Image (cartoon, rainbow, N blue to C red):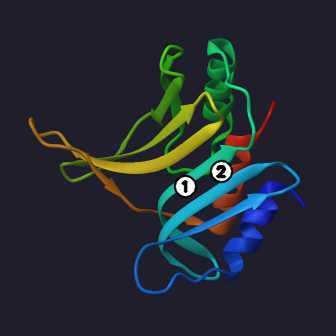
């Protein structure tokens, strides 16, 4: 069973009770650990707060490998409301930052995804809300995805080529 299919199967049975909870599991065949923090989950989808994956026992990626991973994720991740683009790859910090290419706008608010990749094989997906007004801070917000979209995104984050 693929990692995407495993994620979908786990989500199909998961029903967080009262408030935000985290589903965490390790996929033994691939070695990837998956954490999904959600406010709600039902038979079709969930309202995620954060999604993260971590590669087990990985060697640190060098700058070129980190850049390749970021480019791969930006090119593959098509299940989100906005396409992703690589904003920055910092080999010294061992991080790559991806964001929505064009944020969604509702009234005066902007909404965008942010994906942080770390050279040890960690990836985290969050969604933010920001304002056009000066001196206002962005806020992390939940985002709704179907179980199929969550599985695909996990597959996109963990794809080797």
* Percent x, y of residue 140: 33, 53
Label 2, residues with CA under 10 Å away: few <14, some 14-19, many ≥20: many
Q: Quadrant of the N terminus?
A: bottom right
Residue farthest to the bottom? 17
Do tag 1 and tag 2 residues touch (Cβ < 8 Å)?
yes
- On screen, residue 90 versus residue 155, left or right, reads left
85 and 65: which one is in front? 65
Compared with 79, 134 (above or below) is above
Provide residue 136's location: percent of width, then percent of height.
13, 42
Point out residue 57 in the picture as x, y percentages from the top left corner.
Answer: 75, 39
Q: State the residue at coordinates (40%, 62%).
A: 142
Q: Secondary structure at mark 1?
A: strand
Mark found first going from the N terminus, 1 or 2: 1
62 relative position to 52: left or right? right
Figure check: 111 above or below 85: below
Compared to residue 127, the image places residue 24 above or below, namely: below
Residue at image position (56%, 32%) is 118
- Say how many tags the image has: 2
Residue 7's x, y, as percent?
Answer: 73, 64
- In the rendered structure, the answer to whether residue 144 lies left or right of residue 109 reads right
Separation of marks 1 and 2 at Cα, in angstroms? 9 Å
- Residue identifier under label 1: 51
On-image quarter of the C terminus? top right
* Residue 96 or residue 86, whichever sits in front: 96
Position of 13 relative to 123 (above/below): below
Image mark for residue 153: 2
Q: Is label 1 or label 2 in front?
A: 1
Q: Residue at x 63, y 80 (%)?
A: 14
């Amino acid at each position: 069973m693929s990692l995407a299919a495993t994620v979908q199967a786990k989500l199909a049975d998961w029903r967080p009770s009262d408030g935000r909870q985290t589903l965490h599991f390790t996929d033994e065949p691939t070695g990837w650990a998956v954490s999904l923090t959600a406010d709600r989950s039902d038979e079709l989808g969930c309202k995620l707060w954060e999604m993260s994956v971590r590669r087990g026992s990985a060697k640190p990626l060098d700058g070129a490998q980190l850049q390749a991973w970021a480019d791969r994720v930006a090119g593959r991740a098509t299940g989100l409301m906005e396409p992703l683009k690589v904003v920055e790859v910092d080999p010294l910090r061992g991080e790559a930052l991806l964001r929505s290419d064009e944020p969604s706008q509702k009234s005066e608010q902007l909404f965008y995804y942010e994906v942080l990749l770390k050279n040890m094989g960690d990836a985290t997906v969050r969604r933010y809300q920001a304002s056009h007004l000066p001196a206002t801070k962005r806020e992390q917000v939940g985002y709704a995805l179907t179980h199929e979209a969550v599985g695909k995104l996990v597959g996109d984050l963990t794809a080797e080529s």
